[in-house]
Image (cartoon, grey):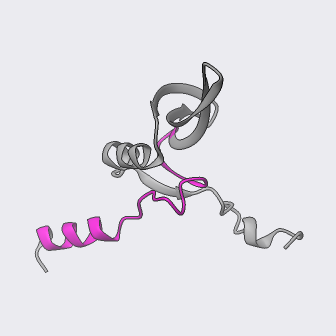
Amino acid sequence: MTRVCWYIGKMEDTKRIDAENWTFSGYKSSDLLVLIHLGAEPSGEETRVLYLVTVLKNSEEEIFQLEYPSLPEAIDSINQRYHHWDFIDRSERQDGGGCGSCAAH
């Protein structure tokens, strides 16, 4: 297999954030983490829901944030900008635990 074919194959295997996993997935690079979360903005008598793509340093300090009116727009943005970072599934703990290992299940 040529190097180009291998690279294209690896790109297709890369996990991406989608409508099913956006609440517990993100991308990580060094000490930076990017994820999507919900926000809200008052708009007259109503409250408008926002989808926020946020870059955090050390999982705490907000570095950068973009807001989108719809989930598909936020998903497209995060995947376009950060898909080359490592995909992380935050529902799985690093020590092998995770949501499925909780005693409540």
- Give percent across and percent down for residue 57: 55, 31
Question: Is residue 91 shown left or right of residue 75?
Answer: right
- Give percent across and percent down for residue 58: 59, 34
- Give percent across and percent down for residue 97: 74, 67
Q: Residue at x 83, y 68 (%)?
A: 102
Question: Is residue 12 shown left or right of residue 88?
Answer: left
Q: Please tell me whether residue 89 is drawn above or below residue 63 in the rendered image.
A: below
Q: Please tell me whether residue 64 is drawn above or below residue 53 in the rendered image.
A: above
- Residue reaching furthest right? 104
Q: Which residues are magenta?
A: 4-33
Q: Quadrant of the C terminus?
A: bottom right
Q: Nearer the viewer, residue 10 or 65?
A: 65
Q: Residue at x 29, y 69 (%)?
A: 12
- Residue reaching furthest top? 44
Quarter of the image for residue 78 reads top left
- Residue reaching furthest front? 45
- Give percent across and percent down for residue 32: 50, 37
Q: Residue at x 61, y 37 (%)?
A: 59
| Magenta-drawn stretch contains 10 | yes
Q: Residue at x 44, y 30 (%)?
A: 66
